[in-house]
Image (spheres, grey):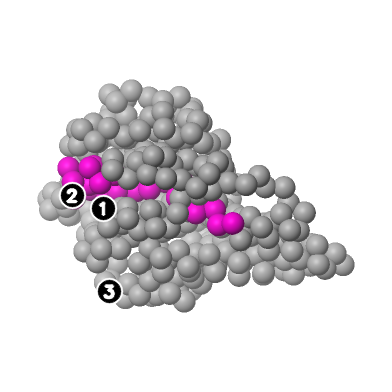
Amino acid sequence: MRQLLDEAAKGGYGVGAFNVNNMEQIQSIMEAARETQSPVIVQASRGARAYSQDRFLYHLMIAATEIYPEIPTVLHQDHGNSVATCKSAIDMGFTSVMMDGSLMEDGKTPASFEYNVAVTREVVELAHAKGVTVEGEIGCLGGIEDGHGAGGDGLEHLTDPEQAVEFVKQTGVDALAIAIGTSHGAYKFSSKPTGETLKMDTLIEIHRRLPNTHLVMHGSSSVPKDLQDIINQYGGKLKPTWGVPVEEIQLGIRNGVRKINVDTDNRLAITGAIRKVFAEKPEEFDPRSYMKPARDAMKKVVALRMTQFGQAGHAKDYAPIPLSEMIKRYASETVAV
Ligand SMILES: [Zn+2]
């Protein structure tokens, strides 16, 4: 992932990181990547790894790289809660891991700065020895997703720019997730977010102080109204909600954001497409009759985000560096931290 993010920084664009649990979601992302010629980050939470029993995920991703050899593809552990989780991901073949030491191992209790530095440093040492990239987090996001998160509205544990500098210096992470008021899950904001709810000034300040650290925006689904409407039109009961506007993400990309995590938008697209088939064709019972439209709907959202984030058209800019080469680079410290 380090290479993907370095290239994105060079090109001044962002790369979407999309969560997966199953074959259809992986297919949607890879098809969108081929259509838009985008490098791509596929990520799996602990919940996704449990759901896919790890081995299904592993072999589905091998299939993805066989079928789409021209697409630079990362498999990233989303929100690793412990050194052991990150280690098991690396052992399985993930090329990037997130050690989220902003929370304790329970994935809920905000942790101390010292704890965060200690566990993240440990993961950086074992990951870089294998050529694997590390994302850390400083400050805590709001909301809860897959049982992970501090809850709240995301404004309680914002990232302090000075602490972010210290954290990067002490841990050597490649990428840094920051808390600027975003939340996990569908219910992010109860009205359209403004400069007050999203702390873009903090993001800009962190980038000014850490120009060589790739910043990561979590909880960055835009939760578009048209996708909410499809679900509700066909029997769903979503409450009105607002996500992170694409323009704010683009402002972030102009200020050092290289990885943008998106999950909710894809979940909404899939659920809406399935509900539509169930409502319009109640006689259908072949799972493909609703999984195909679901896959198409997710592909459309992913392709749109790839274009909006600027990664479209960059799949063939470079040849992926093998992990063995990354091991050498990390060992010789030619990789800037
Ligand atoms: Zn997250």
Please give the label number shown on residue 225. none
Residue 211 numbered tag: 2
Which residue: 23% across, 56% down?
A: 326
Numbered disc 2: secondary structure: loop
From the viewer's perspective, tell me whether residue 22 is left or right of residue 11.
Answer: right
Quadrant of the rendered image containing residue 305: bottom left
Residue 250 relative to residue 288: left or right: left
Q: Gap between marks 2 and 3, in whole Å?
A: 23 Å
Which stretch is magenta? Answer: 203-225
Circles 1 and 2, Cβ within 8 Å, touching? The answer is: yes
Is residue 80 shown above or below 321? Answer: above
Instruction: Tell how many labels.
Output: 3
**To which residue does mark 1 refer?**
256
- Tell me which label, 1 or 2, sits earlier in the chain: 2
For mark 1, give the secondary structure.
loop
Do residues under tags 1 and 3 come within 8 Å of each other at their CB atoms? no
Residue visible at 41% across and 28% down in the picture: 156
The reply to whether dot 2 and dot 3 touch (C-beta < 8 Å) is no
Residue 222 % position (x, y): 49, 54
**In-image side of 167 versus 97 (left or right):** left
User: Which is nearer the eye, 82 or 267?
Assistant: 267
Query: Mark 1 Cα within 10 Å, few/some/many (few <14, many 20+)?
Result: many
Q: At label 2, which amino acid type do we have?
A: Pro
According to the picture, the residue beneath numbered tag 3 turns out to be 317
115 or 194, which is in the foreground? Answer: 194
Horizontally, is 240 left or right of 290 in the view?
A: left
Type of amino acid under label 3: Asp
Q: Amino acid at mark 1?
A: Gly
